Amino acid sequence: MLRIRKYNKITGKKIELEELEKFKFEFNENNGKYGYVERNYDGFTYISINSWNRKILFEQEKEYDHICLNVLYDLIQAGYVEKVEE
């Protein structure tokens, strides 16, 4: 499972979820999640992040491998993502 860290791996500073807006995530007040949608010819892929546990979830309209790799890569490079055991 992937989730957003509480503290940035590179800077050591606390990560506020509002910072995800720099990566084109938008906060949805109805479900309390930050979301990012990527549309392409085959449908869409959606990344959502729960505010309460920071877990990263992927949803796809159709079966294909593309899962918003660019934005996920940017989050990893910025020190925001960690892999945790469930």
Image: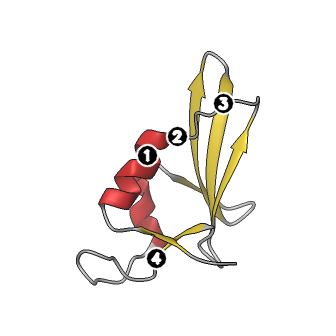
Q: Which is nearer the N-term, disc 2 or disc 3?
A: 3
Q: Position of residue 6 (x, y in %)?
A: 45, 82
Q: Which residue is mark 2?
A: 68
Q: Quadrant of the rendered structure where residue 19 is?
A: bottom left
Identify the residue shown where x is 46% and y is 76%.
Answer: 5
Q: Which residue is mark 3?
A: 44
Say if mark 3 contacts mark 4, CB within 8 Å: no
Image position of 57 with respect to 6: above or below: above
Q: Which residue is mark 4?
A: 5
The quarter of the picture where the C terminus appears is: bottom right
Q: Which mark is residue 13?
A: none
What secondary structure is found at the residue carrying circle 3?
strand
Say if mark 4 contacts mark 2, CB within 8 Å: no
Mark 4–mark 1 Cα distance, whole angstroms, equals 16 Å
In this view of the protein, can residue 22 be seen by the observer? no
Identify the residue shown where x is 40% and y is 68%.
Answer: 80
Mark 2–mark 1 Cα distance, whole angstroms, equals 6 Å
What secondary structure is found at the residue carrying circle 2?
loop
Image position of 3 with respect to 30: above or below: below
Q: Which residue is mark 1?
A: 71
Disc 3 residue type?
A: Phe
